Image (spheres, helix red, strand yellow):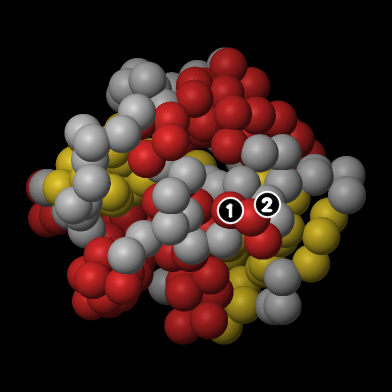
Amino acid sequence: MKLIVGLGNPGDKYKNTRHNLGFFEIDKLSSNENFTEWKLEKKFNAMVSLGEIVSEKVILAKPQTFMNNSGVAVGKIARYHKIPPSDIIVIQDDLDLPLGTLRISHNASSGGHKGIQSIIENIKSQEFIRLRIGIAGEKKGEIPAEDYVLEKFSQKEKDAIDSDAGLLIEAIETTVSVGALEAMNEFN
């Protein structure tokens, strides 16, 4: 069983912001595959959807703990379902990558991303897979990073992200079926 987590912040205030790119992408994944409707699982403090990717059982999750505490929900789900860190895939925004760029990391530090740091602390490992999607767009550098990530995408930026949706789904399918190293070789 695999756990695929999209990082973001709950609530309409944060919808379509750069920091919610993980939520946005995991919603696309759930609609393109055979997954159940999203359901709030209070014991995990996460929205959860169940299904399969390439014949592998998968739990999709959107932590409702806010970005900086994402690891609380991820840790609860992983412990309950006995999912080892190596079977966790996290979809995250990355301020250091150009808009829409996809990179796959495995066994990497948080790189300053507080949601990732929370996951590392809560599962006591960095052995999980990260699908990092660039959010460095038109305004990067003009305003502080903590404000930039909470701004909404411009239509031009949203269109650029949408055009790469198939690539992300292909990267996830490859990662689930053959593993992180092969996916990193193919997509990085």
User: Mark 1 is on which residue type?
Assistant: Tyr
Reading the image, the residue beneath label 1 is 14
Residue 73: where, in percent of width, then height? 71, 38
Mark nearest the camera among 2 and 1 is 1
The residue positioned 43% from the left and 57% from the top of the image is 152
The residue positioned 46% from the left and 74% from the top of the image is 28
Reading the image, the residue beneath label 2 is 10
Depicted 122 relative to depicted 151: above or below: above
Let me know if residue 144 appears in the view: yes
Residue at the extreme front of the image, as rendered: 142
Residue 39's disc is none
- Please state, as top left, top right, bottom left or bottom right, where the N terminus lies in the image: bottom right
The residue positioned 47% from the left and 72% from the top of the image is 29
The residue positioned 35% from the left and 30% from the top of the image is 145
Q: Is residue 144 left or right of residue 182?
A: right
Depicted 54 relative to depicted 43: above or below: below
Depicted 171 relative to depicted 38: above or below: above
Residue at the extreme right of the image, as rendered: 42
**Helix, strand or loop under label 1:** helix
Q: Is residue 86 left or right of residue 8?
A: left
User: Mark 2 is on which residue type?
Assistant: Pro
Snapshot quadrant of residue 92: top left
Asked if disc 2 and disc 1 are in contact, CB closer than 8 Å, the reply is yes
Let me know if residue 130 appears in the view: no
Real-space Cα separation, disc 2 to disc 1, in angstroms: 7 Å
Total numbered circles:
2
**Helix, strand or loop under label 2:** loop
Is disc 2 surrounded by few (<14), some (14 to 19) or many (20+) residues within 10 Å? some
Is disc 1 surrounded by few (<14), some (14 to 19) or many (20+) residues within 10 Å? some
Q: Is residue 136 left or right of residue 80?
A: left
Residue 59: where, in percent of width, then height? 63, 59
Residue 68: where, in percent of width, then height? 59, 29
